[in-house]
Image: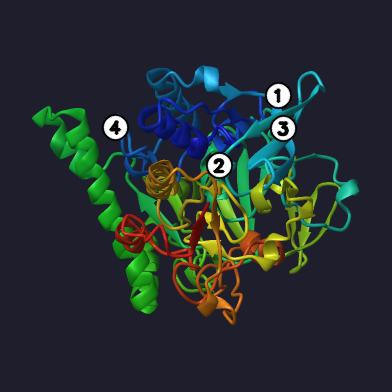
Amino acid sequence: MIGAGISGIGAAHRMRTDFPDLGFVVLEAQDDRGGTWWTHRFPGVRSDSDLFTYGYRHKPWHGPAIASGDAILGYLDEVIAEDGLAPHIHYHHRVTALEWSSEDDRWTARVTRTDTGRHLQITADFLWMCQGFYDHDTPHIPHWPGRRHFEGTVVHPQHWPRDLDPTGSRVLVVGSGSTAATIVPALARQAEHVTMLQRSPSYWLPAPTVHELATLLEPLALPAEWTHEIMRRAYTQQLDLLADTSRTDPDSMHEFLIDTIRPLLPDDIDVATHFTPRYRPWQQRIAITPDGEFFTALREGTASVVTDTISEFTAEGVRVRSGEIVPADIVVTATGFDLAVFAGIPFTVDGEPVDFSTRVTWRGLMVSGIPNMAFTFGYFRHSWTLRVDLVNDVVARIFDRMQDRGTGVVTPTLRPQDADMPLLPWMPEENFNAGYVRRSQHAMFRQGDREPWTHMHEYSHDRTALPAADLDDGLQYR
């Protein structure tokens, strides 16, 4: 397994509980567990999904639905301890190449120790990619004229300096996505003032940190697993409704989202300019603000919004297209990230380099022509981990099938009727068009126009389709 974040730890749990006789190892390039929750250390870092669905199916979540990064790391630590996973996780192990040999029916991972520089080779029968979906090393930062003239500090949230103190500073946050939704109110509690500069508005949703249903259940003293399941179902139903209505009746969802935040905004703000997006709901991620904290900062005057584009940096801040200069001591480039196809690791199969952009996915968890390789990819609209559990179920079924048949290799293989199947984009823009998706389409694997070569379905589809998936349809065993 590659990656010791939410996906890798979930996969390791499944191996430990369902296949205790099989050896496995988790390779992690970072120096500790947690993936995103370890690398992201900016002020206020937290989930933008509820923890009842972001947590694992097998492990009840205790606490507020919206949780801090530290709380999520603590939850993962409990899973590692309870399952005895620590000896299986190897930190500082950066995989630099993955090579499949049909002669040996094995994968070879070429690894560099990031702490010692030592080079290793590790072989395995099966490869499980659990590294997440974006580049942890290189965030996305646009080129802006005049940046070298700026006399203040420029920082990307993905590489937040431990010693950066925003107290009393004028802070400019560039971007209006999930990171900005988190960092603006956190910085507003320390800085003199925070300005969020956005090219175009995002959709926002104020969500209670503690769900009213959880408050009602608390006096009943229910078993933890009961409360967890009830809350998990409640949040899933809510997410299903948001996603389905955004697709079937986007106009009413647009009106609902705007009307929900309108009473939370300052009276003098221009809603049409600053809070009315130009895309349909859920075509990009909705910015979640727990208990409306972002809007509280706007009303209190500790934060403000500018909707414009950057013309250039100046010594004292940023000049926008209107000519206005937004003064700043610190500029936070909350401009997103780039996807990395399987962590950017080069793959070869029998000595031939793999170009993933010419291949299609099998049900969003394997790739055509790649033997004994599964990957975990979650949801954009629902909690990532809802799909982690479903993928783990399917991979476990495949392992059982291989053991029952006495076969050692499984390969997704196009059927004769798929010979003329078109290669469709990894993610159609009409479905989801966030910048990191558009920037990375050319390198990602594709999907087809029929089962089992499609993916990016909603949880409402996957929760019945994946458990019922025919493991002989599109898979060849030997």
Sequence-wise, the earlier of marks 2 and 4 is 4
Identity of the amino acid at label 3? Arg
Q: Quadrant of residue 214?
A: top left
Q: In front of the other: label 2 or label 4?
A: 2
User: Mark 2 packing: few (<14 Cα in 10 Å), some, or many (20+)?
Assistant: some
The residue that label 1 is drawn on is: 163
In the current view of this chain or complex, which residue is farthest to the left? 220
The residue that label 3 is drawn on is: 94
* Label at residue 60: 4
The answer to whether one can see residue 41 in this image is yes
Instruction: State how far apart marks 2 and 4 are (Cα).
Output: 25 Å
Identity of the amino acid at label 1? Asp
Camera-nearest residue between 83 and 223 = 83
Q: In front of the other: label 2 or label 1?
A: 2
The percent coordinates of residue 273 (x first, y second) are 55, 70
The residue that label 2 is drawn on is: 128
Instruction: State how far apart marks 3 and 2 are (Cα).
Output: 15 Å
Image quarter (top left, top right, bottom left or bottom right) of the N terminus: top right
Instruction: State how far apart marks 2 and 1 are (Cα).
Output: 37 Å
Please say which color scheme the image uses: rainbow
Sequence-wise, the earlier of marks 4 and 1 is 4
Camera-nearest residue between 93 and 421 = 421
Instruction: State how far apart marks 4 and 3 are (Cα).
Output: 32 Å
Q: Which residue is rendered at x = 62% and y = 50% of the image?
A: 195
Camera-nearest residue between 183 and 318 = 183
Circle 1 SS class: loop
Q: Please tell me whether residue 55 is drawn above or below residue 142 in the rendered image.
A: above
User: Mark 3 packing: few (<14 Cα in 10 Å), some, or many (20+)?
Assistant: many
Sequence-wise, the earlier of marks 1 and 3 is 3
The percent coordinates of residue 147 (x first, y second) are 86, 50
Q: Which residue is rendered at x = 67% and y = 40% of the image?
A: 104
Circle 2 SS class: strand
